[in-house]
Amino acid sequence: MSKRIGVAARAAAGARTRAVATPRGLWVEVEPGFHVGNDGLQYLGSITVVPGRGFEASGPRSDVIGVFSDLDDAKAAVAASSRSGAVGPLVG
């Protein structure tokens, strides 16, 4: 195997082990800084940009899941919350 092919093969193998899970569902930024998610069957929740803090993730009943520094992490947390059936208190 040539050195160039070997380097490319090792890089591809390393990329597979470092892959990040893609957040489940369809996410749409309905207005600047406000994202909503839906998986085709149900409303997953929303994510709001909080300046200076990050991304505040909320479940389908507006229960706050947490604040995340990365948008994809917030999306994954909302999706995981909907899969686990975790539901916080109703807001309103």
Image (spheres, helix red, strand yellow):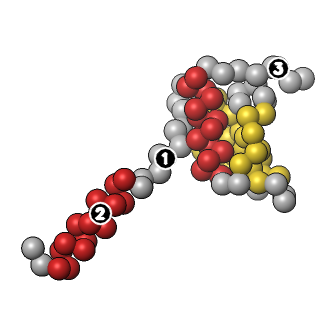
Distance from Cα at disc 3 to Cα at disc 2: 46 Å
Residue beneath the point at 76% across and 22% down: 88
Residue beneath the point at 29% across and 63% down: 12
Distance from Cα at disc 1 to Cα at disc 2: 18 Å
Residue beneath the point at 73% across and 34% down: 65
Relative height, residue 13 to residue 5 (above, below) = above
- Location of mark 1 (residue): 22
The residue positioned farthest toward the bottom in the image shown: 3
Relative height, residue 68 to residue 57 (above, below) = below
Nearest-to-viewer mark from 3 and 2: 2
Q: Earlier in the sequence, mark 1 or mark 2?
A: 2
Left or right: where 76 falls relative to 90: left
Helix, strand or loop at disc 1? Answer: loop
Q: Residues within 10 Å of mark 2 (few under 14, many from 20)?
A: few
Q: Residues within 10 Å of mark 3 (few under 14, many from 20)?
A: few
In the rendering, at what x and y percent does residue 8 appear?
Answer: 25, 71
The residue positioned farthest toward the right in the image shown: 92
- Quadrant (top left/top right/bottom left/bottom right) for the N terminus: bottom left
Helix, strand or loop at disc 3? Answer: loop
Q: Amino acid at mark 1?
A: Thr
- Location of mark 3 (residue): 90
Q: Amino acid at mark 2?
A: Ala
Q: Quadrant of residue 57?
A: top right
Q: Amino acid at mark 3?
A: Leu
Which is nearer the eye, 38 or 57? Answer: 57
- Location of mark 2 (residue): 12
Whether residues under marks 1 and 2 lie with C-beta atoms below 8 angstroms apart, the answer is: no
Left or right: where 5 falls relative to 48: left
Distance from Cα at disc 1 to Cα at disc 3: 28 Å
